[in-house]
Image (cartoon, helix red, strand yellow):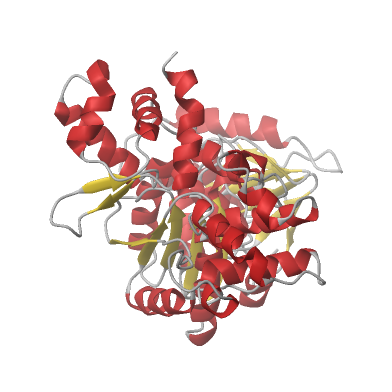
Amino acid sequence: MKHLDPGDRLATPPFQLLSRERALLRNGQPVKIGARAMEILIALAERPGELVSKNELLDRVWPKQQIEEAALRVHLSALRRLLGTDEQERPLIVNENGRGYRLIADLVDLKSTQRTMEQLRQDFPRPLTSIIGRELLLAELADLCRSRRLVTLCGPGGVGKTTLATAVALEISETHCLTPVFLDLACLDEAETIVGSLIQRLGGIASDAGGLENAAQRLAGRDYLVVMDSCEYVIERVAETVEALLRAAPSLKIIATSREPLQAEGEWLVRTPALDLPDADGDVTIQNVLRSSSARLFVERAQAQDSSWRLVEADLPALVCICHKMDGLPLGLEMAAAKLSSMCLSEMDGMNDELYFALSSGRRTALDRHRTLLTAFDWSYDLLSVEEKTLFAQLALFESEFSLESAATVAGDAFASSCSLSGLLADLVAKSLVVADQSSGSTCYRMLRTIRAYAASKRHQVLA
């Protein structure tokens, strides 16, 4: 019999032992097994058919410890019950009294489970529509990602963080021979870990034991660029995990998207801006309006819905207003453009704040949080604390910029001190629900028009 090499699989139906992943499968499904029992099984599997003495097993499983042989027998007895017998009714683990144990199993050669660079590149999401108005930002992000190992794109829902992250990851992976990997953390099950999800994406089987070490082994020897999308859902777990992964895999780079900073060591933060808006006070001509990326995005998406649709001079005032109402958020503009199938631009413009909640024509294949502008904001709102939700709803009273003192006035007695109020306000800024402007030498705050309309819709809930 051939000895077990790292990465080989020991297969005896219905079991498979994946040594590198430290996982035992039964009919392809992970079997719960303790760390010491797994170490014993791997030790026996490394020398299939050979006798492994009890002292060797004791030294391997309990190094530099004085452990009674009874402890070893307990784990081996559990292993023998778990594995049972093979097709010829032979026990898979044989005990030679007083000498040791041997594993009776057939070792089969299987290719490494490590996925190839080409497989990972094919699985990586690619934009199917043009990216408008982001040329300069993409170039700046590419330069930053080449020199830094952890870059986080922050911004409100619908601003296009995922599109930017995947676009820049594809660009620099092709020019710098990096292997791109995409993880959507919003899809994690409660029991799943970020490391386990990464291992599975790389082609392995996640197990309870040795997860970080397993991931580091898979990341070693190849330059990976991992995009971690929607980190706000598991923000604390992400911060801990990225620090550990970056230490364990020196050549690893990570681009994260989140509605708030990770606050992890080595993080470089990029606030993702909305698209620029057309000038509402200047000469409103088709040429001038289409200089703004928000108007160009709307027109392109409108023509994608109806190739015969054309922008005319009479529609310009309504288009300018809609771009401003949508705050230049790509998701809102795309959904507003989709509304042209049921109403004209002037009718859409006349809806005022109701427009935000009428936008429900997202892609059928989009994630739930990207289906509508409302669900995009719900995603952020549901992650807020009770105190944050209360302040968020009260700030909807401001139709323009406001100061900390003004915020304290509308907050009333809801917060015990100005310190707690400023802390909560800072949290809302960090979570991309309030914008802070320090260009005048003092801090002024404001809410995007779309977010303010959403906050106003929540006032009756939190203030009841």
Quadrant placement of the N terminus: bottom right
Left or right of 91: which side holds 46? left
Residue that lies at the very extreme toward the left in this rendered image: 441
Left or right of 199: which side holds 212? left
Residue that lies at the very extreme toward the right in this rendered image: 88
Quadrant placement of the C terminus: top left
- What residue is drawn where x is 47% and y is 65%? 277
List x then y, in percent, for residue 211.
Answer: 48, 49
List x then y, in percent, for residue 461.
Answer: 49, 19
Relative to the observer, which residue lies in front, 144 or 209?
Answer: 144
Relative to the observer, which residue lies in front, 387 or 97?
Answer: 387
Position of 326 relative to 182 (above/below): above
User: Residue 404: in sight, yes or no?
Assistant: yes
List x then y, in percent, for residue 452.
Answer: 44, 39
Residue that lies at the very extreme toward the bottom in this rendered image: 175
Quadrant of the rendered structure where residue 374 is?
top right
- What residue is drawn where x is 39% and y is 23%? 386
User: Residue 112: in sight, yes or no?
Assistant: no
Position of 244 relative to 275 (above/below): above
Left or right of 91: which side holds 211? left
- What residue is drawn where x is 48% and y is 70%? 225
- What residue is drawn where x is 46% and y is 56%? 257
Relative to the observer, which residue lies in front, 314 or 352?
Answer: 314
List x then y, in percent, for residue 454.
Answer: 50, 36
Position of 112 relative to 432 (above/below): below
